[in-house]
Image (spheres, grey):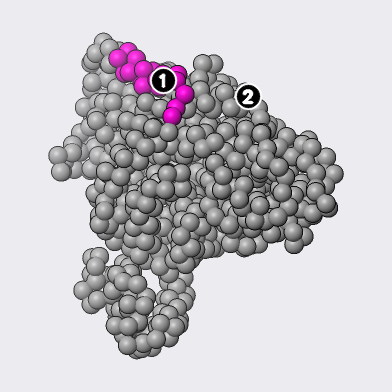
Amino acid sequence: MPNQLINETSPYLQQHADNPVDWYPWGEVALQRARDEDKPIFLSIGYSSCHWCHVMAHESFEDPETAAIMSEHYVNIKVDREERPDLDAIYMQAVVAMTGSGGWPMSVFLTPDGTPFYAGTYFPAEDRLGLPAFKRVLLSVARAYREQRERIAEWRDELLARLNQELALGGSTSPPTPASLDLAFQRLAVQMDTVNGGFGRAPKFPQPMNLEFLLRYYLRSGQPRALELVDLTLTRMASGGIYDHLGGGFHRYATDARWLVPHFEKMLYDNAQLARLYLHAWQITGRPLYRRVVEETLDYILRDMTDAAGGFFSAQDADSEGEEGKYYLWSMEEIHALLSPSIARVVCDYYGVTPAGNFEGRHILNVGRDLPTAAAAAKLEVDEYRSMLEAGRRALFEARQKRARPGLDDKVLTAWNGLALAALAEAGRLLERPDYLQAATRNAEFVLSQLRHGERLLRSWKRDATGDGGQARLNGYLEDYACYADGLLALYQATFDPRWFSEARALADAMLAYFADSRVGFFDTSHDHEALIVRPRQLQDNAMPCGSSMATHVLLQLAAYTGSDVYRRRAEDTLAAMVPLVEQYPSAFGHWLNALAFELAPPVEIALVGTAGAADLHALLQVVFETYRPHQVVAFATPGDEDASSAIPLLKGRVQLDARATAYVCRGFVCQAPVTDPQALADQLKQG
C-alpha cells in the first residue's frame, strides 16, 4: 500500500512511495505528528540520480523488518534535496558539524522541533567497512532519545549556536582590489593537476566556475599560465570517459584522476555550465574541438532533457537495468557486430577499445590521441579517417538509443533552467544557431508563465501523469530568482527583446524585496518562507553558483545597464564582506570570483542604435561579439523605440549618426564619442 509520498511530484519521492516505510514529505503534518507522539524524526535527504541513495533504499527502505523498526520508533520524512535546497543546506551543515563530512544519502535524526541530534550519510544493512548496520543505528538512537533528553537538549543549544555563527556574514568593509584576483589565481594554480588537468586528485569534478575565473583572469592579466591550465583541463575532459562521445554531454564527475571512469549520472546544471565554459574557451582560442563540445552538449539537452512545453529536465540516472553505466558501455564484440570491419577498426582504434575493456570487462569510450595522429597511424587520410569515424559513431549511437535508458528525473527546476537558458541564448547568438535561440525563448515563456505566481517564482514543475499539463509548487529560493534573472539577461543580449530585460529586472527587484539581509548580503529563503531552525544562507559555490554569488553578479550587470546605486551598493557591499573568504579559499568561491572580476574590470556598457537585420548593424555586432568580453553589457534599440529606451536607461538619448548604425561605448555611464565604423568601435573596446 503506498505511503504519504504517493501524491508528491518529485520523481525521487515517487521512487519511495511504495516502500513499506511510513514515509511523509516534509511538512506540518509530519512535524505535528512527531510533536503529538513525542517521537524523534528520521530525515532522509537524497536525489533521484544518487547511486548510494538507491543502494540504501534497496537494502533498508524496501526491507519490511527495517521498515517496521522505522515506523515503530520514528516519524519518517523523505526530502528531495533538489526541490528543497533550504533543508538540504541546513541539515548538511549539521551533518558536517557533527561528523566532519557529509554526502548523500543524508541520514539525520531530529527532535520533534526539527533540531538534529545524530547524523550520518549511508548506513549499510549489515555492519561493514567500519559502518554500523542501519537497524542497529535506528534502535540505538531511539533508545538515546528516550533516555538522554537532557544531553540532547545541550547538544541542541550548542549546534544551533554553531549553525547561526556559520551563517553570519561579516568580513571586510574595505573595497576589494585587483590583488584579491591575483591571490586567488596563485592559489588555484597550485591546486591544478598539471598532467591531467582539473583540480586536485580523484575523484575529479569539472568545477566550471573556477575554470571560468581562470579564463577571465587570463583576459584581464594576459597571464598565459591561466589559459594553459584551462586548455589542458577542457581538452582532457573532452577526451575522457567523463564526456559522452556518442550522445554529447558530461557525466557528473570522474572517479579517477584521468577523467576516464565517470560516475555516470548526467545533471542539467553541469552541462549548462560546461557548455557555456567551452563556448567562452572557443571564443578565445578558436579551437574546433570546443565548438563541437558546445554543440553536442546543447544538442543533448534539447534531445534528451527537454519537455514538450519548453522546460528542461533535471537529471539522468547513472543506472539502467540495475547496473551502473550499462547504457554507456561497449565490448569490442558488440562494436564489430554492428559495424563493417574497416569502420570497426577505426572506431576501436580511436576510442581505445580492447578485448579486455577498461571498466569491469567492458569499455568506456575515450580518446587517447588527436585525430591526425590516429589517421597517420592507420595509414589513412585525415578526411577519410574522420568520415569513417563519424559513420561508426552514428551507428553506435543509433544502436544505443534502442537500449534501456537510464532513469530520467523529469522535474523542471527554475534555477537550473536559468543556467541552461543562459547557455542556449549565448550559444545561439555566437554560433548563429536559431534553434538554440528558439529553445531559449520557449523556455523563458514557459518558466515565466508556469513557474511564476504574480511577482513570485516557484521552485519546481512536473508534468502530470496524464501528460496534459503540469503542476508547479514550492516557494522559489534566492538561487531561482538569481539564476533565472541571469539567464534572462543572456537572452536579452541574444535577442535584444526588451521584454527579457524588464523581466530580469523584476526578478532582481523581488530578490531585494524578499531575500536581502537588512545589513548586507542575502538569505536563501524569502522573509515569508516557512520558519526553519535557522534561516539558511549558503555562501560557498558548490556544483552550481550559490544564490548569493549569482544575485551579486546579476545586480552588477543591472547596475551597468541602469546606473542604479541601489543595485550597485548592495552588490559592492556584499562582495566586500566576502573578500576574506574568497581570498583564503578561492576554489570554494568560483562564481564570487567572477562577480568580483566583473566589478573590478570595470564593466563596459555598449549601446547600439540601428535597424534590426541591416548590414551596418551586423558589422558592429560582429565586433562586439567577435571575442569573449566577460565584462561588458550590450543593449540595442531601433531609432525612436521609446519602449526600449525607457526600459533600459543605457539606451536613453541614443540616436543614429548620419542614418547609420551607431555604437556608444561607455564606462560608468561616461561615454566615448559615438562611432559608426566597425574598426573605430574595435579600437574603443580595446581601450581600458
Give the residue drawn at x 30%, y 54%: 197
* Residue wearing tag 2: 565
How many numbered marks, from 0 up? Answer: 2
Secondary element under disc 2, as helix, strand or loop, is helix
Three-letter amino acid code of the residue under disc 2: Asp
Ranked by sequence position, the earlier of labels 2 and 1 is 1
Q: Name above or below for residue 328 compared with residue 8.
A: below
Q: Which residues are magenta?
A: 156-177
Q: Is residue 445 left or right of residue 17?
A: right
Q: Nearer the viewer, residue 280 or 26?
A: 280
User: In percent of the image, x 57 and y 38: which residue is there?
Assistant: 603
The kind of residue on which mark 1 rests is Ser
Q: Quadrant of the C terminus?
A: top right
Q: Quadrant of residue 248?
A: bottom left
Looking at this view, is 85 or 674 the one in front? 674
The disc label shown at residue 172, or none? 1
What element does badge 1 sit on? loop
